[in-house]
Image (cartoon, rainbow, N blue to C red):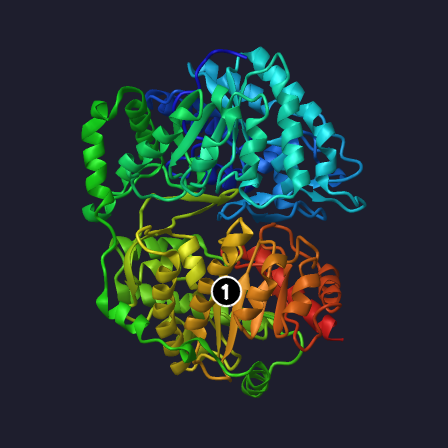
Amino acid sequence: MTETPLGSTVLGYPRIGPDRELKRALERYWAGDIDREALSEVGAQLRRQTWTELAAAGLGSVPGNTFSYYDQVLDAALLVGAVPDRFAGLDPLDTLFAMARGREGVPALEMTKFFDTNYHYLVPEIGPDTAFSLAGRKPVQEFLEARDAGVTTRPVLLGPVTFLLLSKASDGETAAPLHRLGDLLEVYEQLLGELHAAGAPWVQLDEPAFAADREPADLAALGLAYGTLGKLTDRPNLLVTGYYGALGSALATLAGTPVEAIGLDLVAGGGDLARAAAQPGLRDKTVLAGVVDGRNVWRTDLDRALSQAATLLGSAARVEIGTSCPLLHVPYDVVCETGLAPGVRDRLAFARQKVDEVVTLGRALREGRDAVADRFTAAATAVHHRGERNDRVRARLDALGANHYRRGPGPGRAAAQRAQLGLGPVPSTTIGSFPQTGRIRADRAAHRAGRLDTAEYEQRMRGEIERVIRLQEDIGLDVLVHGEPERNDMVQYFAEHLDGFATTAHGWVQSYGSRCVRPPVLYADISRPEPITTGWSSYAQSLTQRPVKAMLTGPVTILAWSFVRDDQPLGDTARQVGLALRDEVHDLEAAGLRIIQVDEPALRELLPLRAVDRPAYLDWAINAFRLVTGGVADSTQVHTHLCYSEFNEIVDAIDALDADVTTVEAARSKMEVLSALGAGIPRGLGPGVYDVHSPEVPDVAALTELLVTAQQWVPADRLWANPDCGLKTRAEAEVVPSLRNLVAAAKAARA
C-alpha cells in the first residue's frame, strides 16, 4: 500500500471514440477490410487519448483498464480463464470475438442487460471444469502502456463477487457460480500482486451487484472477498465501488474490511449518505462521494452536490468527489453539438463536462466554494431552467378515465383476430427492421443535409419498402413488415417527430460491442404534431394481401433509451409519451393496419434493483403501455417485443400489458425463458429462435428443434416463429437464408 491520495476522479469513461472510431474499426476488421495490427492501433490511440485528456483535466487519479474491444465482463472472463471448452484453440482476440458473436457451429455466450442500463454484457459460464487462472495480463499491460504515455492510472477491475453473481452455471453444474469464490480470489490475489509490482498505487474493484437486493450469503461473500484481498501486504490501495443505487447493508460489510476507500452512488442511492454516518469503520477510510450523475446528461446542481459531499466529512478520514457510476452511459462532449438550441445545450453536460464538474467540486471541497464561485453561478443558472409545459397535453391527461386503459376480454379478441387475419398455427414473422444498406443510410443522410429533396427521398424509401415486401412474400413469411428503411434508430426516429425532444449529432453511446445509439434528450412536455408512421405502414399494406405489422416503440423504452428530464416524476413523462403514441395507434388502425406492434424491450431494463421500489414502477409502466393500446378494436392484434433481459421477475407485468402476442429473445438461452413465460402469458407467444446478434445462419434442424422445444410450454395455436430482435444490423446475405430456414422450421413445427 502507498500514501498516495485517491483524489477526485471518475469511475470510467466512454471507449468507442468521439467519432465511433472503435465501431468502425471493429466492423472493418470483422469484414476482413483491415488486419489485426490496424485494429490494435485504433485501440491504442483511443486509450492514449483518454488517459492524456483526463490527466490534463486535473483529475486526482485517472481510471485505467476501461477500454474493451467488446465488453468489460467478457474481458474479465478471459482474464480469469473462464472460457468454455467450445472456444478452445483460438488466440485471445479470436476467442473474445467468438464468445461474443459465435462462430460456425459454435453458439456465442448469452447476452443480457447490465443491471438497469441499456448496456448489454456477455454472461460468463462457470462449470465444474472451469479452471480459474490468471490467463491474461490486460490490466497490467494497459497500466504500463499508460505509464509510458506519462500517465499513472488506477486499473479498474470487475469485482470478484459481482463477476460470479453475473455469471451462470453451465451445463452439468448444479451449484451457483458463487461457490467458486475461493478459487477466483486466488487469481485476484495474483493480479493485485502483479499490479503492485508494476507500480499501481490504486486499483478500483467494481461491485455494482450490491446496489440490488442480496441474500445473506452474498453479503458474506463480499465480506470474505475484501477481508481476504484487504489483508494482502504487497498490493495497491483498494477502492471498492458500488453504483446504480445504494449499497444498503453492503456498506456496513465493506466498512468492516481493510480496504482503503469505498465509492458511493449518491445520485441513485442517496440513502447511503445517512448510512455512512452510522459506520465507524469508515473513519479510517476514504469515501468517494459519487455526486455527479454518470447516467444522465443534465448539468449538476453544484451547490447540492457539494452539500452532499460535505455531509460525509465527519464520517470518513477523507472525502473525494467522483461520478455516481462510470461515464460509459453518456456521450463524449456536448461542445460538438452545435446544432442544439442554446437553451437546451447550455443545460447539458456530457462526459467531458462531467469531468470538469468533478474537478470543480473537488476544488470547492478542498479550498472552499469561493475558489470556484463563477462556475457555481453558471451551473445554478442552467439547473434552474428546466422543462417547458404544454397545457393542452396536461389537460388531455387529466381528462382520461379508466376506460382509456382497457381493451375487450382476451378470448373475444382472439376469435375476432382469427376471423380478421386468417392465420394458422405457428405463423412466421420478423420483429420489424430489415437490413439497412449503405445506400439507404446515404439517402437518409442526404435528405437530412438537404441534398435530396423530400419527394425524391420518399420515392426511394417507398421503392425499398416494396422491395422488402416482395422479398418477404418470396421467403414465405406469414406476417410482413415494411422494414423501417426510413428509421435511423427505434427511439431517435420517434424523438425526431415528437415535440419536447432534441436529438444530437454526435451523442453516441455504446450499447454492446460495435452497436452504438444516440439517445435523444427529452427536455419538455411531449406531444405529437402529426402522424409519424402511418403513411409508410399503410403504403406497405397496400402492396400485399398478407397482413402487414405496423411498428411503434413503446413509452417505457423511449424513456429508457433517452436522456429524460429530471424535474418531474418519470411516470408523468411516460403518460405524455403514451398519449402521443395512442394517437398514432388510432391513426394506424383507421388506415387499415390490423396488426400493431408496440415494442417494449426496456420493460425489464428499467425495473428497479430493489424490490421495494418495483410496484410503483410497474404500475406506471403498465399503465403507459395500456394507454397506448387502449380502445383499439378487438379485431386489431396488438404485439409487443421484449429482448435480452431476465424475464422471470416480470411475468405478471408482461401479462398485465394485455398484448395479444408477445415476442421475446430466447435463442441463446435455448428457450429457458419459456418455463416461466409459457404458463404466465395465456395469449400468443413468439420465442426468438434466430439469434440476430450472431453472423451465423441457423439451419432448419436447429430452428425446428427450438420450436418443438417451445411447444413444451406454448401450444402451436399460440406459438409464433420469429427472430430474437430486429434485423437492421445484419447483412442481407445472412438474413435471407436465415429467414427461409425459419419459415421451413415453422412449417415443420406445425406438423
Q: Position of residue 379 (x, y in %)?
A: 23, 37
Corner quadrant of residue 48 = top left
Looking at the figure, which quarter contains the C terminus?
Answer: bottom right
> On the picture, is 711 further left or further right than 730?
right
| Residue 176 x %, y % | 73, 43
Q: Nearer the viewer, residue 206 or 148?
A: 206
Rendered view: 259 above or below 129? above
Q: Residue 738: percent from the left, percent from the top?
A: 63, 60
Q: Secondary structure at mark 1?
A: loop
Q: How many marks?
A: 1
Q: Residue at x 51, y 56 (%)?
A: 614
Q: Which residue is mark 1?
A: 432
Nearest to the observer: residue 717 or residue 741:
717
Q: Amino acid at mark 1?
A: Gly
Other-residue count near label 1 (Cα within 10 Å), few / some / many at <14 / 14–19 / ≥20: many
Q: Is residue 136 visible?
A: yes
